[in-house]
Amino acid sequence: MAIFFLPLLLVAAPTLDIYFIDVDHGNAVLVVSPSGESMLLDSGPSGHIYTGRILAAMQASGVKQIDYFVVSHYHWDHFGAIAELASRVPVLNFVDHGQNVEADRSPEFYRQWGISKAHPDYDSYVKTREQGKHRVAAPGDRLPIKGVEALVVTSAGRVLGKPLEGAGAPSPGCFMTGERIENEVEDGQSIGVLFRFGKFRFIDLGDLTWNISYRLFCPENKVGQVDLYMMTHHGLTIDRESQGAALWSASSDSPAEVYGLHPRVAVLSAGEDYVGRMATPEAWQTTRSSPGLEDIWELHYQAQGGEQNNSDEKFIACPNVNDCQGGTWIKVSAEQDGSFTVTNRRNGFSKRYPARSTGGAR
C-alpha cells in the first residue's frame, strides 16, 4: 500500500490586534478581535486629519466597519471625530456611560472646575449614535465582541462591586496613594474596559480620576494583573495641590493603580503639544518604577519630561511632532498564550514579549 506524506501547512494563530492611533491631543484605540470584529475606544478630536488616521488604521487592519464604538467620557479629545467617522464607515453600536455630568450645570460649577459648558461636539455625538444601537454600560457588563472578552470595570463613577476571579489581593501601592478630593467632571465618569484573550490582558481606563481608581484597587485589587496598560488620563499626575484642586483631583496613574495592575508594557497616548502638556514626569516615573514593567511605548516624545522621563527613540511613534504630520500608530499583536509583539509603525521596530512563565492574579 502506498503511503503519501502531505506537506505540513503552517497557519499563523489568530491574534488580538490593538492599534494605538496618534490623534495628537486625545485617545483612539482600535481593537480587532481574531474573529475580525472591531471596537474603537474613543476617537480623538474632531477634524479630517484625525478621521483619516483612524480610517488608515482600519484599512491596515482589514476592517470595514466599527462594530462597537466606546466613548470613555464626553471630553472633546475622546469623541470629537466620531460624527465624521460615522459618515464615512458604518458604526453599528455606541456605548457610553449615560448622562453628561457637565451639561446644564450652574455657573459656579463651571468656575469651580475651570471648564466651559458641555462641548458642542456632545450634541453631534448624541445625534450620531441614533444611527446605530445605543447602550449605557455599567461595571460588570460584557461587551459582545466575538473572539475576546471585553469587560467593563468602571463607568459613571462606579467600579466593580467585587474582585474578578483570581483577583482580590491588596495592591502593593495602596499605602503610597491615599485619597484626594472628589472630582466632579466628566473624567471620573470614564468607562474602563479590561480585555481578556486567553492568558493575555489589556486595560484602558480612559481618563479615570484618582479617587475612583483608588476604589478599584484599594483595599482590594478588583482587577488583578495585566500584560498591557494604557496609561490613564494621558499620563497626568499632579501631586502638588498648589497646581489647583481640579487637576490635583483629576490626577491618574497612582501607585495603587499601576502597581496593582503590574503591567509588562505601558503605552502613553499624549500629544507633544497637548493641552497644558499634561503628561507629567510624576506619572512616567510611577509607571517606570512599577515592578515587572519592561517598557513604555509612547505616541509622542514628551518635551516637558526630558530624556530621563521618555523612552528610547525607537519606542516612540513621534519623536518630533513635525515629522509625524501624516499620523502613525503603535500596534500590539497578542496571542492566547499571553505572548505579544509591539511594533512602531514609523520605524518598523518590533519587540516580542514572551508569555509569562509564572504570574499572580490574572
Image (tube, rainbow, N blue to C red):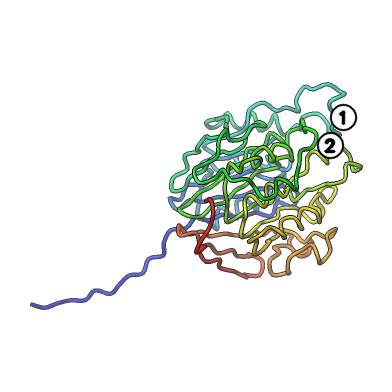
Residue at 86% from the left image edge and 23% from the top image edge: 107
Q: Is residue 249 visible?
A: yes
Residue at 55% from the left image edge and 68% from the top image edge: 352
Give percent across and percent down for residue 242. Answer: 92, 42
- Where does the N terminus fall, quadrant-wise? bottom left
Q: Which one is in front, 15 or 132?
A: 15
Q: Which one is in front, 130 or 302?
A: 302
Q: Which one is in front, 59 or 208?
A: 208
Give percent across and percent down for residue 222. Answer: 58, 41
Does 118 appear above or below 61? above
Residue at 62% from the left image edge and 43% from the top image edge: 85
What amino acid is labelled 1 in the image?
Gln
Q: Which label was assigned to residue 246?
A: 2
Q: In which quadrant of the rendered view does residue 348 lie?
A: bottom right
Mark 1 closeness class: few <14, some 14–19, many ≥20 residues within 10 Å = few
Mark 2 vs 1: CB contact within 8 A: yes
Mark 2 closeness class: few <14, some 14–19, many ≥20 residues within 10 Å = some
**Relative to residue 150, is residue 27 drawn left or right?**
right
Q: In which quadrant of the rendered view does residue 162 lie?
A: top right
Q: Which residue lies furthest to the left in this view?
A: 1
Does 230 appear above or below 113? below
Give percent across and percent down for residue 261. Answer: 62, 51
Q: Mark 1 points at which residue?
A: 112
Q: Which of marks 2 and 1 is nearer the N terminus?
A: 1
